[in-house]
Image (cartoon, grey):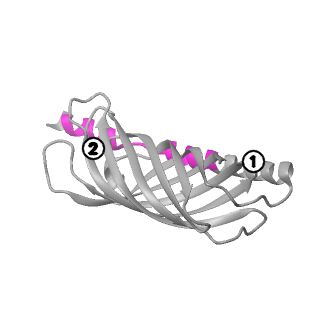
């Protein structure tokens, strides 16, 4: 029993450096891209388009009880946006975060797949030389799947609130977005009741407008 306890403690030790590295890299990428937009285009572009498709990269950051279970992780994915009116848009997103299970011994990788659809509200005109802020609300699902552990994957419902900024330059758009997710989480093994969990997603994407 004592040996088992020592092994479990070792799994819990250490810091979540992946998320911190991703955040630092994200800040650097955003700074360079914003500078490039200003230098290359030098003026506020037209804000009119039907939508955009963009890949993104950032950080997945568990909070509260979720942080006791999962480590920070890199977040990658893609979005598709359709502008229904000048101020309202629909955005569908798919993301993947290869996190680590802090609880189970063995340094197990737990892949988290996020997919959702949300509504965004933008101002009617660009501000700050071609940048427009937005707020959003959405809902979807999240699937947890162990990579090398014989436990069935589990999917839970979740919702999010978003805050972000679009920087437009002709057919190219840069997006910075932060999301606060609330989800119903049920343990993957051993049963147990569903509990409300919280985590954050912070990412940047470069997209092509059409």
- Give the extent of the magenta segment: 4-26
| Tag 2–tag 1 contact (CB < 8 Å) | no
208 left or right, relative to 192: right
> Is residue 19 found inside the magenta-colored segment of the image?
yes
**Residue 152: quadrant of the picture:** top left
**Spot occupied by residue 157 in the image (x, y as percentages of width and height):** 29, 55
**Spot occupied by residue 101 in the image (x, y as percentages of width and height):** 32, 41
Residue drawn at x 72%, y 67% as measured from the top left: 126
Callout count = 2
**Spot occupied by residue 30 in the image (x, y as percentages of width and height):** 68, 51
Between circles 2 and 1, the one closer to the viewer is 1
Number of the label disc, if any, that sits on residue 32:
1
Q: 107 above or below 159? A: above
Q: Secondary structure at mark 2?
A: loop
**Spot occupied by residue 59 in the image (x, y as percentages of width and height):** 51, 48
> Is residue 59 found inside the magenta-colored segment of the image?
no
- Structural crowding at the residue carrying mark 1, measured as other residues with C-alpha within 10 Å and reported as few (<14), some (14–19) or many (≥20): few
Q: Is residue 183 visible?
A: yes
* Nearest to N terminus: mark 2 or mark 1: 1
Residue drawn at x 36%, y 54% as measured from the top left: 140
Q: Which residue is mark 2?
A: 103
Cα distance between the residues tagged 2 and 1:
38 Å
């Amino acid at each position: 029993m004592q040996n088992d306890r020592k092994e479990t403690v070792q799994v819990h030790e250490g810091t979540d450096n992946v998320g911190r590295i991703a955040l630092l890299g994200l800040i650097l990428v955003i700074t360079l891209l914003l500078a490039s937009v200003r230098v290359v285009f030098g003026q506020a572009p037209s804000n009119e388009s039907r939508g955009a498709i963009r890949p993104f990269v950032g950080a997945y950051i568990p909070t509260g009880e979720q942080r006791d279970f999962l480590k920070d992780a890199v977040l990658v994915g893609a979005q598709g946006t359709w502008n229904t009116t000048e101020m309202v848009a629909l955005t569908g997103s798919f993301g993947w975060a290869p996190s680590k299970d802090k609880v189970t011994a063995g340094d197990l990788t737990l892949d988290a797949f996020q997919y959702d659809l949300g509504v965004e509200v933008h101002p009617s005109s660009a501000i700050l030389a071609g940048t427009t802020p937005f707020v959003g609300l959405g809902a979807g699902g999240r699937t947890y799947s162990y990579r090398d552990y014989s436990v069935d994957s589990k999917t839970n419902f979740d919702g999010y609130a978003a805050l972000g900024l679009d920087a437009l330059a002709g057919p190219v758009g840069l997006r910075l977005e932060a999301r606060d997710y609330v989800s119903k989480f049920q343990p993957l093994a051993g049963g147990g009741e569903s509990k409300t969990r919280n985590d954050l997603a912070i990412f940047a994407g470069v997209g092509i407008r059409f």
